[in-house]
Image (cartoon, coloured by chain):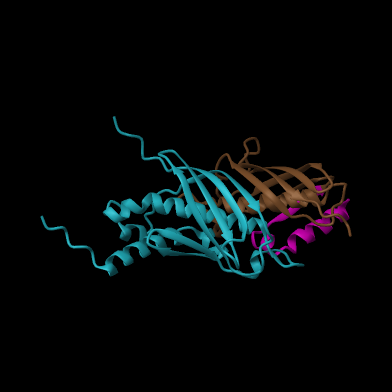
Amino acid sequence: MSRAKPEPVQVIKQRRDAALSALVESVPYIGFLGITFERRGDELTSTMHFHDALIGNPMLPAVHGGATAAFLEVTAVITLQWFHIWPQFESGALEVEAMTAGQMPRLPKTIDFTVDYLRSGLPRDSYARATVNRSGRRYASVHVEAWQDHKDKLFAQATGHFLMPQERAAEG
Amino acid sequence: MADKTQLARQFIEAIPHSAALGMELTEIGEGRAVILMPYDTKLIGDPETGVIHGGAVSALMDTCCGAAVMSHPSAPSSTATIDLRIDYMRGATPGQTIRTTATCHHVTRNVAFVRAVATDDATDTPVATASGAFTVESKP
């Protein structure tokens, strides 16, 4: 009748943090843009740390619309993949040690991505969160919102559709 | 015309983010612009295949569409993206330069409408297409 003893909190935290770092660090472009992710349970918030290479309009100055689009797309893909692999590394089906050693599951592929530019991006850090509105075996729909100073004053939002990585063709 | 292309090239290359991505403007005029982005490992989005991240393609599309608006005969003094949709047909082949052509096909007093296509060396099948709306800032 007795339940299994819960895992020590440090073990859980270390596994989840290691899985997230392995996922984020596997993509060179995320490092190039200077994007980091913070985790609370399975909730993720991304930050694009401002630096001069992100500027699109030197006169204002403002963050380049392309950098903003990339930030939103990175947040959408990583968040989608995070929810996709969560049950796998939590159950042990996916070994975090293997992920850290570079054996990463395939990433979802972007089918389309539509960005709304609501305000100009100021020369400061940007934050974003993505919501997976639908995640099927083949297709997923993800919405992502980004803000700077005020969480309720978005400077950009986007919706994208993604093709989920397909399992190797079933045998037989 | 050569001077105009030269000026536009300097303008694009003075945009820090475009320079960081290695963009190179090769043609501009009459609401049409062509920009190249050479392959670079720092732009990889899929480590397993070495394919460039969609976000870098978005940045290229956005820059090229903006350049097309600026070169339209109605001569807006400035522009900003209102909305941009990108469809990804296939991954760009690793090692190959991505070439984007944007056309500003309609301009109203306040809005410019733009389409763009990106290809790699296989020029008959697009890597991605884009369509967007941009603001038109008239001269003060």
Judge left or right: residue B16 versus residue A100. right
Q: How many marks?
A: 0
Query: Toward which corner of the image does residue B127 lie, by quadrant?
Result: top right
Q: Nearer the viewer, residue B71 or A85?
A: A85
x, y percentage for residue A77? Answer: 49, 51
Q: Which residue: 67% across, 66% down?
A: A122
Judge left or right: residue A105 versus residue B136. left
- What letter labels the chain drawn in brown? B
x, y percentage for residue A94? Answer: 31, 53
Query: Toward which corner of the image does residue B117 lie, by quadrant?
Result: top right
Q: Nearer the viewer, residue B13 or A35?
A: A35
Residue furthest front in the image = A152
- Residue B21 in view, yes or no: yes
Location of the C terminus of chain A (image quadrant): top left
Residue furthest left in the image = A1
Magenta stretch: dominant secondary structure:
helix
Residue furthest top in the image = A172
Looking at the image, residue A125 lies above or below residue A28: below
Q: Nearer the viewer, residue A85 or B63?
A: A85
- What residue span does the magenta drawing correspond to? B1-28
Chain A: drawing colour: cyan
Q: Which residue: 83% across, 53% down?
A: B5
x, y percentage for residue B42? Answer: 55, 60
Q: Which residue: 68% across, 59% down?
A: A119
- Residue B95 in view, yes or no: no
B27 falls in the magenta region: yes
A130 falls in the magenta region: no
Q: Which residue: 57% across, 39% down?
A: B89
x, y percentage for residue A53? Answer: 65, 66
Location of the N terminus of chain A (image quadrant): bottom left
